[in-house]
Amino acid sequence: MRISTIALANLRRRKGRAVFLAAGIAIGVGTVVALLGLNSALREEIGSQMDRFGANIIVTPHSGNLALDYGGVSIAGVSFDQHQLSGDDIDRIRQIPYRKRLSTVAPKLLGSLDVEGRNALVAGVDFASELRLKRWWRISGRPPQGGKDVLLGYDAATTASAIQIASVKNGAADDGSAHHAARGETLQLAKDSLKIAGNEYRIAGVLGQTGGPEDRMVFVSIGEVQALLDKPDQLSVIEVSALCKDCPVEDIVAQIQKALPHAKVSAIQQAVRARTDAVERLSRFSLIVAAVVLLLGALMIFTTMMNSVVERTKEIGVLRAIGFRRGHIIRGLLIEVAVVSAAGGLLGWAGGLIASRLALPFFAEAGATIGVSAQLALFAMAVSLGTGLVSSVYPVLRASRLDPADAVRSM
């Protein structure tokens, strides 16, 4: 008679105990799978949404500043050793070793120009890259295409009398005005054009209030602003978006700094760090919870196997008496544990996957998903088999050391 046949027969005879052990392992493995699945989904969500935070690397001209004061009275400082950014610097940024990690490179030229008879801050931008970078912008009207199109910040539009606020019936707003729909208002253009430095431009749209400096700006095509300010090919700042999953931002900053020694390159990572730290804390908490649950499962298996050895003393004695060796006894018990552990691991993986998908909407935004991972399935099976076998080592060794004579005498 084969030892595997005996092991499987024992499992069929003790179905209740086998189901109990499999359920215990499934709960532990399911908890681990659910927590790891949620953790992975949150990391993926960060990777896919970080671009919406905007630039995380800012490139500005390098200059020295000397603060002055005389007799305790502060005097305007003096700037020296000033450098300028140019279009060539954009090409240098796009040639760094980590260039494939760069999501968006958005150049800007800032200056003060006459807008409808008043001085206003005008930003020359490449609208295609700027709109990719500032995905949270809500535009009333249409996105500008460049050329003679302009985009007005909310305060700039108000000052130029370019907008009027209309009430919205039933809380419904026109496309692009969701920011104001929550307040029952929507922005409407009051005029189609305005003059900047004596030149007429088309008003493509107006930004909803952002609470930032964009509210005061007038956005114009960068080529137009360079011509109006008589600063051909000059730039004031370059914003770079490299916020992707596991991006080495510090290395990217170092490479850009090496390519542009005349510029100051700064990384803005506060928002990223805060959210990443939150996920790291969740990961640590998940590991602690998973370890505790697996420990409880291992203790349950240990206790159950010890009781099984005591109950099966006569059976083991008979097997030894008819010629089964210690290795046969060990192999038979380990086969039982392996079958139960594999069943528990499979159930735990499936249950954990379902639980993580049900819990995901409470931790992530809509659109986040948890896919079926072969690696996670293999990990779940490895954890279940490892937990079951390790927690059964002592009971199995104890069973193999039973004296056949003592076992038979107890019959």
Image (spheres, rainbow, N blue to C red):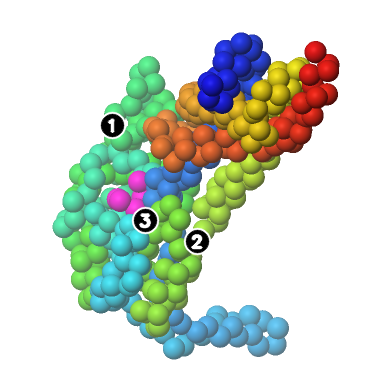
Disc 2, SS: loop
Q: Residue at x 44, y 80 (%)?
A: 62
Judging by the rendered image, the residue that carries numbered circle 3 is 217
Indicate whether 218 appears above or below 297: below
At label 2, the amino acid type is Ile
Question: Which image quarter holds the N terminus?
Answer: top right
- What secondary structure is the stretch in magenta mostly built from? helix
Q: Position of residue 239 (x, y in %)?
A: 37, 63
- Considering depth in this image, is 236 or 366 the residue closer to the camera? 366
Indicate whether 210 appears above or below 355: below
312 with respect to 10 (left or right): right
Mark 3, Cα crowd under 10 Å, few <14 / some 14-19 / many 20+, is: many
Judging by the rendered image, the residue that carries numbered circle 1 is 175
Circle nearer the N terminus (1, 3): 1
Judging by the rendered image, the residue that carries numbered circle 2 is 268
Q: Residue at x 25, y 60 (%)?
A: 126
* Highlighted range, magenta: 131-135
Q: Residue at x 44, y 74 (%)?
A: 254
Circle nearer the N terminus (2, 1): 1
Circle nearer the N terminus (2, 3): 3
